[in-house]
């Protein structure tokens, strides 16, 4: 790997900082979107608990996985990654629903 001229390196560093700033903004947006998503899943958990419904819905989860994998392909994102992300989030949601059903969460 060769080093460029100082002015080229400075330009690259400026571009790098701009790209990283964009990544940071996207990360912040993702956190806010996840928080909003969890607000809704908390409502779902309370509704399920009130009506004696199970914390998880495997058939819905499978439909969501298929839908998100398709969206990932359309967005040029690895569909396996999209599925892993969804499974991670759903595991957390189910835990919340179980806690709500058990009376541990009252939010």
Image (tube, rainbow, N blue to C red):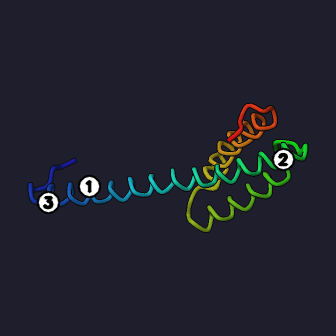
Compared across the picture, whether 53 is left or right of 4 comes to right
Which one is nearer the viewer's eye here, 29 or 17?
29
Mark closer to the chain start, 3 or 1: 3
Residue at left offset 76%, top offset 38%: 100
**Label 3 neighbour load within 10 Å: few <14, some 14-19, many 20+:** few
Instruction: Provide residue 5's location: percent of width, then percent of height.
Output: 9, 56
Asked which secondary structure carries label 1, the reply is helix
Residue 8's mark? 3
Marks 1/2: CA distance?
46 Å
Instruction: Measure the C-alpha gap from mark 2 to mark 3.
Output: 59 Å
Determine the secondary structure under disc 3: helix
Give x and y (percent) for residue 72: 62, 61
| The quadrant where residue 6 appears | bottom left
Q: Which residue is mark 1?
A: 17
> Which mark is first along the chain, 3 or 2?
3
Q: For the residues labelled 2 and 3, say whether their Cβ atoms are less than 8 Å apart.
A: no
- The residue lying at 76 percent from left, 40 percent from top is 97
Residue labelled with disc 2: 48
In this view, the residue farthest toward the right is 52
Instruction: Identify the residue at image location x=77%, y=46%.
Output: 45
The mark lying in front, picked from 3 and 1, is: 1
């Amino acid at each position: 790997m060769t080093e460029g001229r100082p002015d080229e390196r400075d330009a690259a560093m400026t571009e790098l900082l701009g790209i990283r700033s964009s990544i940071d903004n996207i990360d912040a947006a993702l956190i806010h979107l996840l928080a909003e998503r969890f607000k809704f899943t908390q409502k779902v958990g309370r509704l399920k608990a009130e009506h004696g419904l199970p914390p998880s819905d495997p058939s819905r989860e499978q439909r969501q996985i298929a839908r998100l994998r398709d969206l990932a392909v359309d967005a040029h994102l690895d569909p396996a990654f999209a599925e892993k992300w969804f499974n991670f989030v759903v595991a957390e949601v189910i835990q919340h629903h179980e806690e709500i059903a058990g009376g541990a969460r009252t939010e």
